[in-house]
Amino acid sequence: MEQSRAEGFDGFVAARWSALFHLALLFVGGDRHRAEDLLQEALVKLWFVWPRIAEEAPEAYVRKVLARAAARSARRRWWGEQPVEHLPDLAAAGDASALVAERSRLEDALAQLPPKQRAVVVLRYYQDLSEKQVAQVLGCPVGTARSHASRGVARLRRILAEAVESVE
């Protein structure tokens, strides 16, 4: 029994690691190290409930744990210096890199949102969950999720517009 439990869990993690890591990365505003820690924490919690969750919705469970843990960890976030893996390249971008640059701008803008707004925007528009599902994942009323989504998208638009103006 323990062997089949481990195999099922390992298979799930192997199949969904990349997508779950990218989701965690969006929740924490692009910090790869925090995203890895967050995902590992969620997967540890999943391991303990795997026999109950395996046949139902393990990805939904992990998504809920990620969203809540990201919001919780943001409250105790250190606002000092943030290391980055690579220094920004100031060279002119080519055609293929334009998409990467746009995605990077969006991820940077997402990182500037408050944790709850970021979580709602990511769940609603990146994960394509309904407002009701977002509210269930975050454990809040639908109206609160709707409000966070509206404010988050409005703030994203302002941040991205300011970024475009500063470039021109």
Image: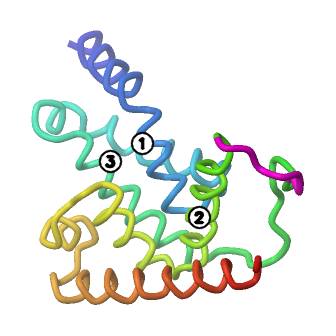
| Mark seen at residue 62 | 3
Provide the residue span drawn in magenta.
89-95
x and y percentages locating residue 134 in the rendered image = 23, 68
Alpha carbons under labels 3 and 2: distance apart: 18 Å
- Give the crowd class for mark 1: few <14, some 14-19, many >=20 residues within 10 Å: many
For badge 1, the amino acid type reads Leu
141 left or right of 86 in image: left
Residue visible at 63% across and 48% down in the picture: 100
x and y percentages locating residue 95 in the rendered image = 66, 43
Q: Are marks 3 and 1 in contact (CB under 8 Å)?
A: yes
Q: Main secondary structure of the magenta part?
A: loop
- Decide which of tag 3 and tag 2 comes sooner along the chain: 2
As drawn, 165 above or below 61: below
Report if residue 168 lies within the magenta region. no
Residue visible at 82% across and 76% down in the picture: 80
Label 1, on which residue?
20
